[in-house]
Amino acid sequence: MQQPMPHQLMGYDRAITMFSPDGRLLQVEYAKKTVRQGSTAIGIICSDGILLIADKRVVDSLVVPESVEKIWQIDEHIGATASGILSDARVLIDRAQLKAQQNRVTYDSEIDTLTVVKDMCDLMQICTQSGGLRPFGVSVLVAGIDDHSPALYETDPIGIYFQYKATAIGEGEIEVEEILHSEYKPEMSIEDGLKLSLKALKKVLGENFNSERIDAAYITIADKKFKRVSRQRIEKVASELKDEKKLRK
């Protein structure tokens, strides 16, 4: 009796426009695996704003940590981070920045976060049904303040998006989301969110955790301005977590 051949041998994983017999686009699934191999990024909606925090994965001591950018400003009130192939992310971020600028010039008003996300996802979706292209190997967390209300979206390589209260992408996604599910509270402040995020990253990175490889930014509801968290503030929170752990022991 003839055995069914693996999808790879049948060639269903070689073209993005070809479905496998069980209705899967294998190239898209490979793109999702690429995202899971990327460095961890976290987004959290807080009572006073929204927070993005990311592991820059600086493993070479000769690399200048400040030169590695993992969180980007799209507009005054919108920021983003990503996991996966960061060069793919840069294309999407550049496109989003341009669209935000065009909206201000054309309508003399700030763009809303969902419009930015939909535009990103439109391009990502096109790349899943056009021959000669490959899917974007990246997921993006887009965070913004719209009409004094924080919004957090996660995009997928297939071009779909979801809105979250708190979420994580990258290699530590499972471990971080376990912590978020058990400890996240909508009433927590940005400072509380920063502590929770660093606690989750410390669990994921273990002995490799270092404040220099952490990038963080936030947008408050009050002023709707994208601001980066200083290195001193990250180090202070990290040391507080270390002291709390010692006390528990």
Image: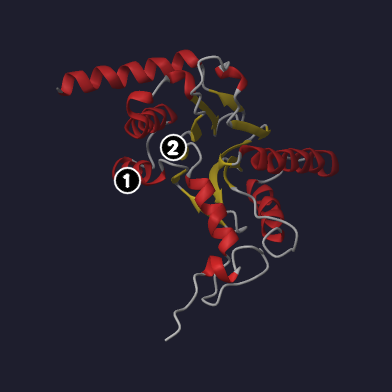
Rendered residue at 58%/18% (across/down): 66
Q: Quadrant of residue 89?
A: top right
Give x and y (percent) for residue 74: 68, 36
Judged from the image, the secondary structure of the residue bearing numbered disc 2 is: loop
The three-letter amino acid code for the residue at tag 2 is Ser
Question: Dot 1, crowdedness within 10 Å: few (<14), some or many (≥20)?
Answer: few
Judged from the image, the secondary structure of the residue bearing numbered disc 1 is: helix
Which residue is disc 2 drawn over? Answer: 47
Rendered residue at 48%/46% (across/down): 36
Q: Nearer the viewer, mark 1 or mark 2?
A: 1
Which residue is disc 1 drawn over? Answer: 178
Residue toward you, 186 or 178: 178
Residue 118, above or below 175: below
The quarter of the rendered structure image containing the C terminus is: top left
Give x and y (percent) for residue 180: 35, 43
Residue toward you, 77 or 137: 137
Give x and y (percent) for residue 62: 55, 14
Residue 55, above or below 93: above
Give how far apart the Cα atoms at labels 1 and 2 are: 21 Å
Q: Residue furthest left?
A: 249
Rendered residue at 39%/33% (across/down): 197
- Residue 10's tag is none
The three-letter amino acid code for the residue at tag 1 is Glu
